[in-house]
Image: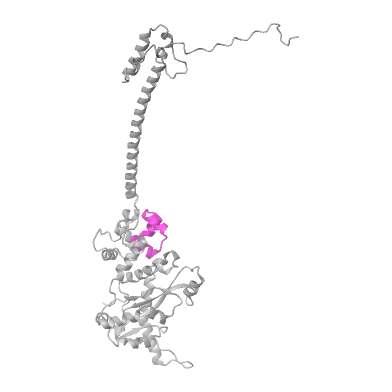
């Protein structure tokens, strides 16, 4: 028995027959665009079927010779719209290609204009956002950042850069900061690093630079300042020294032309154990570098050696620094006479070496073992110490440049001698330690 409620089953719909498009006079429904209405195509004659599309193709500037040369008898597809559709799509493709080329060219032009506008906007923003530089500092800020007054800073700039606007440094690579900052601001950057020892990242933030550009500018400038300042003749003639000698010093030591002393600067501990043992200082109880400094009776630096390992003795550094060789040259040139004196501390047991040159050594007398120091020796010690303190004051002024008073990083070891000598000679641009009494 059937499960359905009715006995007769409705027959299914007859499957439709597939339309044969080869015998039809209109294009298949799959065509993207119909040029002729399918309803009207049945009533058009053979000539009318061709005439309508050709008019539309002529409006698109398409050569109709391709259609007119077709033989209707040999080409059976002529009575259909397939060739016309192909020509129409070719025309449309050509038009789209031309429009695409125009759009690409327009896009390139717009991108060039955009990049140019961004570049100008960036340059303008740099000028507008520049909030730090020589033009923004007052006299007190000059003193804080550089250690010099504004006028003295200008004098240093004129000495380092005699011709205004001169390109004194040949940059080995493209440094944007060298173009962004003026020569005056570049010198300010270097002086800030020497005086305040700010991190390069902080200085770069002040001047709106990258940290790498800031470091490269500093290293190039410190090398230039080393050669420029090192070319100065800082040891004057003995007559000039004696003429400007303080009265008390001239009364006690009229022939002493220089006061020498050693000083140490702390450094980051090297990884090599051998280097650690060489640089370890028993006096400072850490790794240091040691230099020899000589000043005239008024406190101006007249000699500065390179830096040596901290374990070197005072006697050895005097020999290795070239101080004896300098004295011989000064005697031969007439700036120093035979019999002139050198003042030093007790650690400089160099009396024999100076006698060979023809000079005398003024150091505090040593106490005899097991006996009390004589009264004359005590007075001599007090007298020497009273004048020798000026070299320590000069060294303290050098270490006001905080790059030397702190612990020097190993990353600056390649330029440590340049930094040391530059800071020493920059103190000669400061007022005399001992001022003339009015």
Give the residue drawn at x 38%, y 58%.
Answer: 214
**Closer-to-camera residue (96/434):** 96
Compared to residue 90, the image places residue 138 above or below, namely below
Residue 192 magenta: yes
Give the residue drawn at x 37%, y 81%.
Answer: 388
Range of residues picked out in magenta:
188-216
Compared to residue 411, the image places residue 305 above or below, namely below
**Closer-to-camera residue (379/289):** 289
* Res 12 quadrant in image: top right
* Res 308 quadrant in image: bottom left
From the image, which quarter does the N terminus lie in? top right
* Res 313 quadrant in image: bottom left
* x, y percent for residue 286: 49, 73
Give the residue drawn at x 29%, y 84%.
Answer: 250
Asked if residue 343 can be seen in this view, the reply is yes
Q: Is residue 396 left or right of residue 234?
A: right
**Closer-to-camera residue (420/150):** 420
Compared to residue 164, the image places residue 74 above or below, namely above
Residue 76 magenta: no
Considering the whole magenta stretch, tell me its main secondary structure: helix
* x, y percent for residue 243: 25, 81
Residue sitting farthest toward the front: 74
* x, y percent for residue 255: 29, 86
Compared to residue 110, the image places residue 172 above or below, namely below
């Amino acid at each position: 028995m059937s499960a359905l409620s009715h006995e007769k089953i409705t027959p299914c719909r007859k499957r439709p027959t597939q339309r044969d498009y080869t015998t039809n006079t209109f294009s298949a429904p799959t065509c993207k665009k119909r040029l002729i209405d399918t309803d009207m195509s049945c009533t058009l004659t053979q000539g009318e079927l061709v005439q309508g599309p050709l008019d539309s193709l002529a409006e698109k500037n398409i050569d109709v010779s391709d259609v007119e040369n077709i033989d209707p008898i040999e080409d059976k597809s002529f009575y259909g719209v397939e060739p016309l559709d192909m020509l129409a799509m070719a025309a449309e493709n050509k038009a789209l290609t031309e429009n695409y080329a125009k759009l690409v060219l327009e896009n390139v032009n717009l991108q060039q204009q955009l990049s140019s506008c961004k570049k100008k906007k960036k340059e303008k923003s740099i000028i507008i956002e520049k909030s730090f530089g020589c033009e923004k500092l007052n006299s007190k800020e000059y003193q804080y950042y550089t250690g010099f007054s504004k006028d003295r800073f200008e004098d240093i700039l004129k000495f380092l850069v005699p011709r205004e606007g001169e390109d004194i440094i040949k940059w080995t690579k493209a440094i944007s900061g060298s173009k962004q900052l003026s020569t005056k601001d570049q010198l300010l950057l270097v002086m800030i690093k020497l005086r305040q020892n700010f991190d390069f990242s902080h200085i770069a933030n002040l001047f709106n630079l990258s940290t790498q550009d800031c470091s490269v500018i500093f290293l190039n400038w410190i090398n230039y300042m080393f050669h420029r300042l090192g070319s100065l003749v800082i040891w004057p003639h003995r007559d000039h020294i004696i003429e400007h000698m303080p009265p008390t010093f001239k009364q006690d030591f009229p022939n002493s032309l220089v006061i020498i002393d050693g000083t140490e600067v702390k450094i980051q501990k090297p990884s090599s154990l051998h280097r650690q043992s060489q640089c370890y200082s028993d006096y400072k109880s850490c790794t240091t570098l040691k230099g020899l400094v000589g000043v005239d009776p008024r406190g101006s630096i007249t000699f500065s050696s390179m830096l040596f390992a901290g374990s070197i003795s005072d006697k050895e550094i005097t020999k290795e620094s070239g101080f004896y060789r300098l004295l011989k040259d000064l005697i031969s040139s007439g700036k120093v006479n035979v019999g002139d004196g050198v003042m030093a501390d007790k650690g400089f047991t160099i009396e024999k070496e100076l006698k060979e040159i023809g000079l005398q050594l003024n150091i505090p007398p040593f106490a005899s073992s097991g006996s009390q120091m004589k009264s004359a020796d005590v007075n001599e010690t007090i007298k020497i110490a009273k004048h020798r303190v000026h070299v320590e004051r000069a060294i303290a002024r050098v270490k006001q440049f905080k790059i030397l008073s702190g612990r020097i990083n190993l990353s600056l070891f390649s330029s440590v001698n340049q930094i040391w000598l530059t800071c020493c000679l920059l103190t000669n641009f400061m007022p005399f330690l001992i001022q003339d009494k009015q």
